[in-house]
Amino acid sequence: MFMKKGALACAWTLMVISTVSTGESRTQKKGVDTSILTKQEIALLRAIIYDEGLCTHIRKDTPWPQREVSLRKDLVELHQRKRIATIKLLLEIVKGGRPIDSRAAAGMALALEEGPDYAVIIADMSLDSFDKVKSNDSPTCREKFVEQVEKSIGNAEKQFKEGDKK
């Protein structure tokens, strides 16, 4: 049952907008509200994470086949309109979600910010030791994801402020 749902979700989410692949969505336009998501936008984002999860596909429009994270068109559009708020909600899920949801939120946040090919390694990470503390006090997978997504938020906020000065 889960595999069928996951396969269906992956097939349904294969739409990746070219602006994500080229990096155009990583810059925020001046004057765009980034602070607040509506209840509908929050519900959409949570449904994508909790119901569909993190899916990948193979791009064949490149010189060699390239695996990348699949992003729904409406998620990419939300990120383009409200970049910082979108990533902040994904960060909340990374911090407090079940391991599978945390991994999905981190993968989508990094795919939106860094590119779908950048985040593909996250989709393959095992959940067996996701929150396990190692004896040498190294960070857990969740802690690493939180750090990476927080860094992406910092970069987005910096770019937004620089855009306001222009």
Image (cartoon, helix red, strand yellow):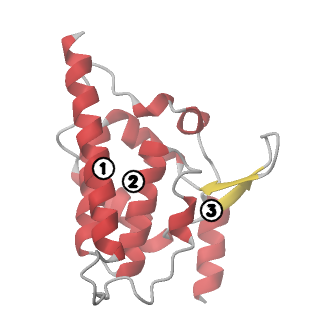
Mark 2: few, some, or many residues within 10 Å (few <14, many ≥20)?
A: many
Q: Name which residue lies at 38% across and 74% down.
A: 101
Mark 3 and mark 1 residues within 8 Å of each other at the beta carbon: no
Percent x, y of residue 80: 39, 35
Amino acid type of the residue tagged 2 in the rendering: Ala
Q: Which residue is mark 1?
A: 87
Does residue 53 lie above or below 31 as drawn?
Answer: below
Amino acid type of the residue tagged 3 in the rendering: Thr
The quadrant the N terminus occupies is bottom right
Mark 1: few, some, or many residues within 10 Å (few <14, many ≥20)?
A: many
Q: Which residue is mark 3?
A: 56
Percent x, y of residue 58: 73, 56
Q: Quadrant of residue 98?
A: bottom left
Q: Name which residue lies at 41% across and 71% down.
A: 103
Q: Is residue 152 left or right of residue 26?
A: left
Residue 122 seen in render: yes
First-in-chain label (3 vs 2): 3
Disc 3 is placed on an element classified as strand
Q: Nearer the viewer, residue 161 or 80?
A: 161
Percent x, y of residue 157: 22, 35
Measure the C-alpha gap from mark 3 to mark 2. Answer: 14 Å
Q: Which residue is mark 2?
A: 109
Mark 1 and mark 2 residues within 8 Å of each other at the beta carbon: yes
